[in-house]
C-alpha cells in the first residue's frame, strides 16, 4: 500500500499539496481580516462584513482542505450531518435575534 492516499476503510486523506494550499489560504484570509481591522480605513459595517466573509471562507477552507468534507465521503453522511447542524444553528441564532428584536420593540413602545 505504499504511495497510496487511501486507508483501509477507503477514506481519502489529503496530500501535502492540499495541506500547504489550505495553510496558505488560511494565512491569507486571516491577514486580510486582521488588515481590515488594524488599518481603520473602513467603516464599521464594511469591516464587519469583511470579517464575516473571511470567517465563512476560513471555515470552508478548514472543512474541505483539512477535514476532507465532501458529499462522497462515508456515503455523504458527514455532509448531511453538517448541513443539519448549520440549519439548527441558523434557526436557533436567527430565532433568538428575532425574538430579542421584537422584545426590544415592544418594550420601547410604552
Image (cartoon, grey):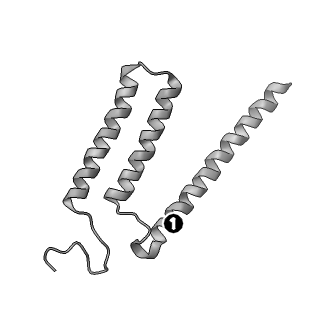
**Residue on which the image places disc 1:** 81
Q: Residue at x 41, y 19 (%)?
A: 40
Q: Residue furthest top?
A: 41
Quarter of the figure that contains the N terminus? bottom left
Residue 25 position, x and y percent, is 30, 45
Q: Is residue 61 left or right of residue 50?
A: left
Q: Is 16 drawn above or below residue 2 in the view shown?
A: above
Q: Is 109 drawn above or below residue 25 in the view shown?
A: above
Quarter of the figure that contains the C terminus? top right
- The number of callouts visible is 1
Q: Is residue 107 left or right of residue 12?
A: right
Element under label 1?
Answer: helix
Q: Residue furthest right?
A: 110
Q: Residue at x 43, y 42 (%)?
A: 55
Residue 92 position, x and y percent, is 63, 50
Q: Is residue 29 left or right of residue 71?
A: left
Q: Is residue 12 left or right of residue 88?
A: left
Q: Is 26 drawn above or below residue 106 in the view shown?
A: below
Residue 43 position, x and y percent, is 49, 21
Q: Residue at x 31, y 80 (%)?
A: 9
Q: Residue at x 19, y 59 (%)?
A: 16
Residue 97 position, x and y percent, is 66, 40
Amino acid at each position: 500500500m505504499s504511495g497510496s492516499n487511501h486507508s483501509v476503510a477507503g477514506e481519502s486523506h489529503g496530500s501535502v499539496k492540499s495541506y500547504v494550499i489550505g495553510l496558505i489560504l488560511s494565512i491569507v484570509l486571516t491577514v486580510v481580516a486582521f488588515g481590515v481591522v488594524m488599518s481603520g480605513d473602513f467603516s464599521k459595517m464594511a469591516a464587519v462584513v469583511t470579517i464575516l466573509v473571511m470567517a465563512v471562507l476560513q471555515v470552508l477552507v478548514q472543512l474541505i482542505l483539512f477535514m476532507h468534507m465532501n458529499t462522497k465521503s462515508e456515503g455523504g453522511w458527514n455532509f448531511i450531518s453538517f448541513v443539519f447542524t448549520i440549519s439548527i444553528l441558523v434557526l436557533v441564532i436567527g430565532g433568538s435575534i428575532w425574538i430579542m428584536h421584537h422584545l426590544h420593540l415592544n418594550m420601547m413602545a410604552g
